Amino acid sequence: MESNTLILPFHRVSITRMPIPRGIAIFNKYVTNQLFLLFAGWIPPLAIVNHIGRNSGRNYRTPIMAFQYENGFVFALTYG
């Protein structure tokens, strides 16, 4: 089995790396993520991950998609 394959109880997903152009990453950081943060926590499946930078100590808020599955959650990450 390949090391870039994720096996979940309900299906098999093959993960391939697809580089995102720098311009899209910057747009997402300053526009898309800020827009999603307005709705995250209020509209399912949007949720917020609060974390602290390990070097800077800065607080970060990252919007993600979280889906309830059996006794836990599945988190969908857009990239990164």
Image: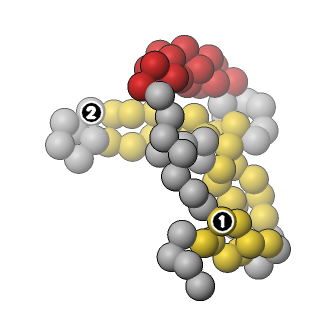
* Residue visible at 54% across and 45% down in the picture: 18
Q: Answer left or right for 56 relative to 76.
A: left
* Number of the label disc, if any, that sits on residue 56: none
According to the image, label 2 marks what residue?
A: 58
Vertical position of residue 54 compared to residue 13: above or below? above
* Residue visible at 59% across and 85% down in the picture: 1
Q: Which residue occupies the foreground of this view, 18 or 32?
A: 18
Q: Which residue occupies the foreground of this view, 69 or 77?
A: 77
Vertical position of residue 27 compared to residue 59: above or below? above
Instruction: Tell me which amino acid carries mark 1.
Output: Ser
According to the image, label 1 marks what residue?
A: 14
Q: Residue furthest bottom?
A: 1
Circle count: 2
Give the image location of residue 47, x and y in percent.
64, 40
Specify the quadrant of the image occupied by residue 55: top left
Give the image location of residue 69, x and y in percent.
78, 64
Specify the quadrant of the image occupied by residue 31: top right
Q: Identify the secondary structure beneath mark 2.
A: loop
Would you say the residues marked 1 and 2 are in contact, meaning their CB atoms lie under 8 Å apart? no
Q: Nearer the viewer, mark 1 or mark 2?
A: 1
Which badge, 1 or 2, comes first in the chain's sequence? 1
Circle 2 crowding by C-alpha within 10 Å: few under 14, some 14–19, many from 20: few
Answer yes or no: is residue 29 visible: no
Give the image location of residue 80, x and y in percent.
47, 45
* Residue visible at 79% across and 72% down in the picture: 11
